[in-house]
Image (cartoon, rainbow, N blue to C red):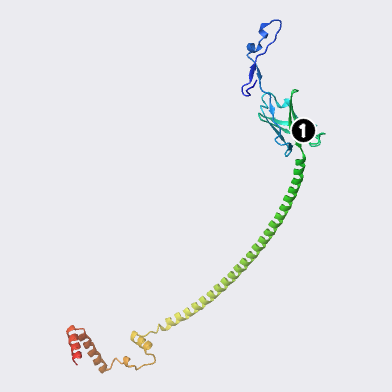
């Protein structure tokens, strides 16, 4: 008969005791029944030989914890026993014994057997410890490689750090020298400016004294313009304003300029020039 693992079969129980009716069916009297579940099923390993790769061994199955507890299950590996750590609906996890404890006479390796009580036994498969040794050897090589790589990386880092510190120190030294030169140049410029300002103050003081005592020497505009335009010519004709003939000529030119401004005169003057 097929059992539903989620809905167990309920069985009634009782005793036949000298025709005592009230004990013939205790399930009805106490409203209690036996629950009948299907047997747990443990699956074999998918590989022909399962290599032990970690600290724990996992065995898959179905309905593993329906009708039994961890204490009801026994896992044997070769001549040793696997310490059960957890039991769930579909998995059993245990910690295998050491390779020496699990050693067996079988040439293929220790066999994994699961026993439940005294009636159920499941042969899961062969477990090999060889991969663990390989992994340990490979792990040692990896550790050595990691240590060597870390040491090389540390050396490179130290070298880069030393180079960076050296470059930084050199840059700081150059910057400090430039700052010192700028400070010296600033002091020199300040001293020269101070000296020039003192000389200027002295010259201004002397000039102020001269102006205070004698006044500012200056010429009228006409004399200044003539000195600039005709230097070293004291009797230039332009300077001779007081001559009578020059005054008459200037008056005639002024009158002629007024006539030129007259439109009628200007037209007659032009026509006369054209006719001649």
Locate the C terminus and report the quarter of the image it occupies: bottom left
Q: Residue at x 70, y 59 (%)?
A: 159
Q: Choose between 149 and 227: the one closer to the eye.
A: 149
Q: Is residue 30 above or below residue 87?
A: above
Residue pointed to by mark 1 = 111
Q: Quadrant of residue 64?
A: top right
Q: Residue at x 52, y 77 (%)?
A: 196
Q: Residue at x 70, y 25 (%)?
A: 69
The residue lying furthest to the right in this view is 105
Q: Position of residue 72 (x, y in %)?
A: 73, 25
Q: Is residue 29 left or right of residue 266?
A: right
Q: Position of residue 205 (x, y in %)?
A: 47, 79
Within-10-Å neighbours for mark 1: few <14, some 14–19, many 20+: many
Q: Secondary structure at mark 1?
A: strand
Q: Choose between 52 and 189: the one closer to the eye.
A: 52
Q: Position of residue 27 (x, y in %)?
A: 64, 13
Q: Is residue 166 above or below residue 116?
A: below
Q: Quadrant of residue 236?
A: bottom left
Q: Position of residue 134 (x, y in %)?
A: 76, 43
> How many discs appear?
1
Q: Residue at x 75, y 46 (%)?
A: 138
Locate the N terminus and report the quarter of the image it occupies: top right
Q: Choose between 186 and 198: the one closer to the eye.
A: 186
């Amino acid at each position: 008969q097929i059992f539903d693992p989620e809905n167990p079969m309920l069985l009634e129980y009782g005793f036949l005791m000298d025709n005592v009716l009230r004990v013939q069916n205790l399930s009805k009297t106490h409203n209690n029944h036996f629950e009948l579940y299907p047997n747990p099923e443990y699956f074999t390993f998918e590989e022909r030989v399962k290599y032990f790769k970690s600290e724990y061994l996992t065995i898959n199955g179905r309905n593993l914890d329906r009708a039994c507890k961890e204490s009801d299950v026994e896992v044997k590996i070769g001549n040793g026993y696997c310490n059960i750590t957890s039991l769930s609906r579909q998995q059993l996890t245990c910690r295998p014994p050491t390779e020496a404890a699990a050693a067996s006479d079988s040439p293929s390796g220790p066999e994994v057997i699961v026993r439940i009580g005294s009636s159920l036994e499941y042969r899961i498969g062969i477990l090999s410890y060889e991969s663990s040794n390989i992994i340990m050897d490979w792990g040692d090589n990896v550790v050595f490689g990691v240590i060597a790589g870390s040491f090389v990386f540390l050396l490179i880092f130290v070298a880069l750090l030393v180079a960076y510190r050296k470059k930084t120190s050199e840059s700081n030294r150059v910057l400090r020298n430039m700052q010192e030169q700028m400070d010296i140049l600033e002091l020199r410029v300040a001293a020269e400016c101070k000296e020039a300002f003192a000389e200027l103050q002295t010259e201004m003081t002397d000039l102020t004294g001269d102006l205070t005592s004698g006044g500012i020497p200056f010429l009228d505009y006409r004399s200044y313009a003539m000195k600039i335009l005709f230097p070293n010519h004291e009797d230039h004709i332009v300077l001779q304003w007081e001559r009578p003939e020059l005054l008459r000529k200037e008056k005639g030119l002024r009158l002629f300029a007024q006539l030129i401004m007259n439109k009628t005169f200007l037209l007659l003057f032009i026509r006369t020039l054209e006719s001649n």
